[in-house]
Each structure stands twice: as C-alpha cells, then as structure tokens.
Amino acid sequence: MEKARCLFNAMEERNVVSWTAMVAGYANYGDMEAAKELYDRMVKNSVAWLAMIAGYGKCGEVTEARRVFDAIVKPDASCWAALVACYAQNGYAKEAIEIYKAMRDQGVRVTEVAMVGALSACTQIGDVHVAEALVKNIEEGCCGEFCWY
C-alpha cells in the first residue's frame, strides 16, 4: 500500500476510481484508519461504502460498519449483504438475520453474500427453521441468479 499511496499522492488529478481503489486497498488490508482518512475526504460511492463496511467487518468493528451503512441514503444490495456478513462473521447472528429480513422487506435483491451470511448466522444459533426457510427461498428463486443444486 505504501507504493500505491506514493503514486496516489503524486497524481495531479484524482478521480473517483483512484480514491475508491485506495480506500478499498487500505480496507482490504485492515488499515481502517488510513481507509477512513481517505474515505472522509472523497465523494462517496457504493464501492467505497462496500469497502468500508467489509473492512470494518474484517476488523471486528461492527459499530463502525453500521455507522457507514446508516449514512447511506439508499444502500444497494452489496452494501446490505456486506452488513449481513459483517454481523454474522462477528458473532451477532440474530442481528444478521434481522438485517437480512429487513433487506428482503425493503425489496432489495438478495445476493449470494447476504444468503451465505444469513445461513452462517443460522448455524451459529442453531436455528434450523430459519435456515430451512432460507433454503426454501432459494428453491423458489428469490435470490436472483443464486442457485444451489
């Protein structure tokens, strides 16, 4: 990231792609302080939001991930899914399932990441009934391109 930051700093004109790439890079490597420093200075977009939510999730900073999500006016399916995964991977299974349900209730397309996060949450708390309902939703085609065979 050090070389990337030097190149970024040397750029005369930075665009949304360069800003987002830097934020995503720092978030992917778990340097959320550097990611946030750039994120706070840039024009926000869904890729940057996604990188921040996922990055905070990887670092166990669920509250910060939720803060980023709540600041999004109209979160897309990827941001919803990242939040479900964030909660599930950090042991907040019931909350992950509630977020998944809210996602569905708001008519947001369920993604593979959201489905896996919700199923992971079900295994954490041993909720076979919700897991069965999720699998039934897959069989009924509620998950777009996502299919299990």
Image: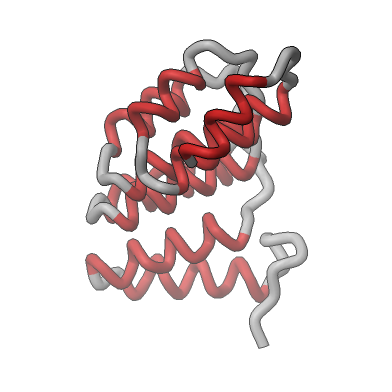
Q: Quadrant of residue 17?
A: top right
The answer, for residue 49, to whether it is visible in the render is no
x and y percentages locating residue 111 in the rendered image: 63, 56
Judging from the image, the colouring scheme is secondary structure
Q: Choose between 9 and 35: the one closer to the eye.
A: 9
Residue shown at the point (45%, 22%) measured from the top left: 70
Residue 22 left/right relative to 99: right
x and y percentages locating residue 140 in the rendered image: 69, 70
Label count reads 0
Residue 15 left/right relative to 25: right
Compared with 103, 147 (above or below) is below
Residue shown at the point (37%, 71%) measured from the top left: 129
Q: Quadrant of residue 47?
A: top right
Q: Quadrant of residue 123?
A: bottom left
x and y percentages locating residue 137 in the rendered image: 60, 66
The quarter of the picture where the C terminus appears is bottom right
Residue 61 left/right relative to 2: left
x and y percentages locating residue 88 in the rendered image: 34, 55
Residue shown at the point (36%, 44%) measured from the top left: 30
The answer, for residue 112, to whether it is visible in the render is yes
Compared with 31, 28 (above or below) is below
Residue shown at the point (50%, 21%) measured from the top left: 39
Residue at far bottom of view = 149
Q: Choose between 64 and 6: the one closer to the eye.
A: 6
